[in-house]
Amino acid sequence: MTTLFDPELGPELRARAQRIRGFVLDVDGVLTDGAIVYDADAREIKSFHVWDGFAVKVLQKIGLEVAILSGRRSAVVAHRAAELGIREVLQGHLKKRPAFEELVQRSGLRAEEFCVIGDDLPDLALFELAGLAAAPGDAHPLVQQRAHYVARRGGGRGAVREVVELVLHAQGRFAELAALFA
């Protein structure tokens, strides 16, 4: 089966991915390409890739937790999260670690059962705690260096979908992607 990632996972990456029961996603540079665009009325505009939205819906259908944790506040993000049915939407957290720790406590999962996908320096504090730290292919170089997995795809261009497919493949659940919507 063709995948967005290299299906030949190393043993450490496979073991990390097999433990994942929840995802924490940054927004700017992960779910979007990082650009912040304003229209003539100073309303914020963001672009989201449908592949990433599909991946979120798949995670929800198979019972994995999904949360958004962003350093910025945005009505556009709140709208997209509501559209996707993401209940845990944590915005305006420049220091992300305390918010992540509270999320972990509320979830009933352990920090090492979360995959964190981040693209910039504020996400590194979460990388230290997460079981699987992933970055889009166009993330900051230091973030790529510290990530357990760097996606081939960029932020806002299917990177989240790629990481989700990798995790599902490692868990032997990749075939569920197509079957869920048949």
Image (tube, rainbow, N blue to C red):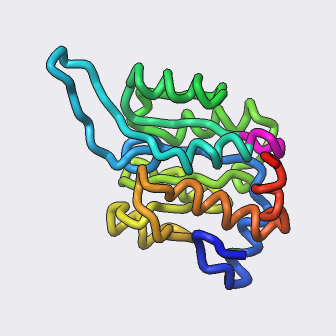
Residue 143 appears at what percent x and percent y?
Answer: 41, 63
Which span of residues is magenta-colored?
60-65
Q: Residue at x 59, y 73 (%)?
A: 5
Q: Quadrant of residue 134?
A: bottom right
Is 114 displayed left or right of 121 in the figure?
right
Q: Does the magenta run of residues contain 132?
A: no
Is 74 displayed left or right of 18 in the figure?
left
Q: Give whichever of 21, 167 is nearer the camera.
A: 167
Residue 32 appears at what percent x and percent y?
Answer: 40, 45
Q: Residue at x 15, y 19 (%)?
A: 40
Locate the N terminus by quadrant.
bottom right
Residue 13 appears at what percent x and percent y?
Answer: 67, 75
Q: Give whichever of 54, 121 is nearer the camera.
A: 54
- Residue extending furthest toward the top: 41
Q: Is residue 1 above or below residue 137?
A: below
Q: Give whichever of 47, 36 is nearer the camera.
A: 47
